[in-house]
């Protein structure tokens, strides 16, 4: 009930992000039901049905990624003063966020089921006719247990992933920081912990003015993310798998429509490994962009932009890596089929739009989270007299540095991926 109240009373922009999650869940659920319909309509082609289901894993992963990013930026489940006093600690808020995510994704799955049943003619209305209805299996009864199992995949995965991403870790970090500060702080002169003051006799000659307490140690900058070697290795493995798989023939029904020739399932596995590798290397590359901005006698503007990128590397690096993988895949396909007109069906188009849209929406959501995270720093700079134009220039400089590094990286990965496919 609390999750419903928080969802109903949220800001319109928050509701828009939740609607995006519901739309992504609806599209993914429709693709999963289409794979089920193809398996029912073609019982003699189990390999093609299994490969269609494997093709749906990319939209599922993109939808879950978007749902987790939206859950992280949900202000209704953010810890606030006073909530712990009424029993809403970090653990309870994590559960509320998981329930809210489940509500949004379940709404999308229910919409997908209604649309699929309407197109089949099971609901009142005009069913879909034509040669593209082979995935509906309208002449056979739909097995509801199998359909519900597929539709619950995105809500369950999104809720579990969101709960893991928002699990309470502040208490452990705070205790570690306090222990480190206590161990490294020197005792103040004249305090009971000072051996010299404990043995010195009290008197007017030994009276000294009381010193202010020692300041807390400054927070050290976060170390550079260490995923660059692993990410590079996984990208190389993905390109190798894609090159090996492109030499074999395409399996029947290996894409969402069964009409897209030359797309074996190994190519999907190679692209998935490439996407995982770019996501692993994204934070390190973003941190490197910040370091490059501060290199060679930086001014105040470059220093502000570079430190901001280094601070936000872990938050926006992975979404940037995913967008880089999606863009490289699209560029590779456009290069392979340059001058040709491949027959891409509606389900393939829907899957591509889902993956690309979820990746871009996740990146914008992560950028919004980064903006909220540095709101205190921005307010402090404005109070100190920093002009707003400097902050805007720093934001443009960060965006330009990311584009200058991730653009050539995307082109390089796309060219390497398209090279074996163009043979």
Image: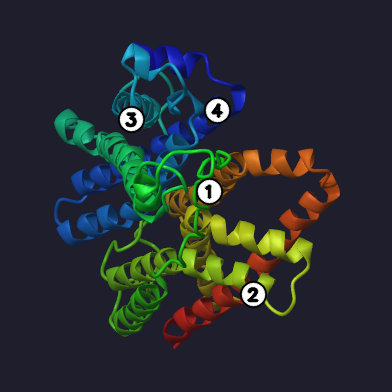
Label 2, residues with CA under 10 Å away: few <14, some 14-19, many ≥20 = some
Label 3, residues with CA under 10 Å away: few <14, some 14-19, many ≥20 = many
Dividing the picture into quarters, in which one does residue 393 lie? bottom right
| Residue sitting at x 34%, y 51% | 195
Camera-nearest label, 2 or 3: 2
Camera-nearest label, 1 or 3: 3
Residues at circles 4 and 2 in contact by the CB criterion of under 8 Å: no
Left or right of 356 in this view: 137: left
Residue situated furthest bottom in the rendering: 423
Circle 4 residue: 14
Marked residue nearer the N-terminal end (4 or 3): 4
Marked residue nearer the N-terminal end (2 or 1): 2
Marked residue nearer the N-terminal end (2 or 3): 3
Image location (x, y in percent) of residue 221: 51, 60
| Residue sitting at x 47%, y 67% | 224
Q: CA distance from mark 4 to mark 2?
A: 35 Å
Q: CA distance from mark 2 to mark 3?
A: 37 Å
Dividing the picture into quarters, in which one does residue 85 lie? top left
Q: CA distance from mark 4 to mark 1?
A: 18 Å
Which mark is on residue 292? 2
Q: Secondary structure at mark 1?
A: helix
Image location (x, y in percent) of residue 284: 48, 69
Please state, as top left, top right, bottom left or bottom right, where the C terminus lies in the image. bottom left
| Residue sitting at x 39%, y 62% | 259
Which mark is on residue 357? 1
Circle 3 residue: 94
């Amino acid at each position: 009930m609390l999750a419903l109240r928080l969802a109903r009373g949220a800001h319109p922009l928050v509701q828009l992000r939740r609607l995006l999650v519901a739309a992504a869940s609806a599209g993914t659920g429709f693709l999963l039901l289409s794979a089920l319909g193809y398996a029912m309509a073609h019982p003699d082609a189990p390999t093609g049905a299994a490969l269609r289901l494997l093709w749906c894993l990319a939209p599922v992963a993109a939808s879950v990624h978007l749902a987790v990013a939206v859950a992280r930026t949900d202000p209704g489940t953010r810890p606030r003063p006073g909530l712990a006093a009424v029993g809403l600690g970090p653990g309870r808020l994590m559960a509320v966020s998981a329930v809210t995510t489940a509500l949004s994704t379940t709404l999308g799955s229910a919409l997908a089921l209604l649309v699929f049943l309407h197109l089949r003619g099971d609901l009142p209305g005009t069913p879909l006719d034509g040669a593209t209805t082979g995935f509906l299996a309208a002449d056979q009864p739909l097995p509801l247990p199998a359909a519900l199992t597929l539709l619950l995949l995105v809500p369950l995965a999104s809720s579990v992933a969101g709960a893991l991403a928002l699990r309470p870790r502040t208490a452990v970090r705070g205790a570690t920081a306090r222990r480190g500060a206590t161990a490294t702080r020197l005792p103040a002169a004249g305090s009971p912990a000072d051996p010299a003051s404990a043995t010195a006799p009290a008197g007017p000659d030994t009276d000294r003015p009381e010193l202010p307490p020692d300041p807390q140690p400054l927070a050290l900058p976060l170390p550079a993310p260490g995923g660059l070697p692993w990410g590079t290795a996984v990208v190389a493995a993905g390109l190798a798998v894609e090159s090996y798989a492109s030499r074999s023939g395409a399996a029947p029904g290996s894409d969402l429509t069964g009409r897209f020739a030359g797309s074996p399932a190994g190519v999907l596995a190679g692209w998935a490994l490439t996407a995982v590798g770019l996501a692993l290397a994204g934070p390190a590359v973003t941190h490197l962009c910040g370091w490059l901005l501060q290199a060679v006698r930086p001014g105040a503007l470059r220093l502000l932009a570079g430190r901001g990128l280094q601070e936000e590397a872990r938050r926006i690096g992975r979404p940037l890596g995913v967008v880089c993988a999606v863009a490289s895949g699209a560029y590779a396909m456009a290069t392979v089929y340059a001058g040709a007109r491949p027959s891409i069906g509606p389900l393939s188009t829907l899957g591509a739009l889902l993956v690309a849209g979820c990746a871009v929406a996740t990146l914008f959501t992560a950028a919004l989270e980064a903006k909220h995270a540095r709101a205190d720093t921005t307010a402090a700079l404005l109070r100190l007299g920093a002009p707003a134009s400097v902050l805007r220039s720093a934001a443009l400089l960060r965006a330009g540095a990311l584009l200058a590094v991730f653009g050539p990286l995307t082109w390089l990965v796309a060219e390497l991926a398209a090279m074996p496919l163009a043979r």
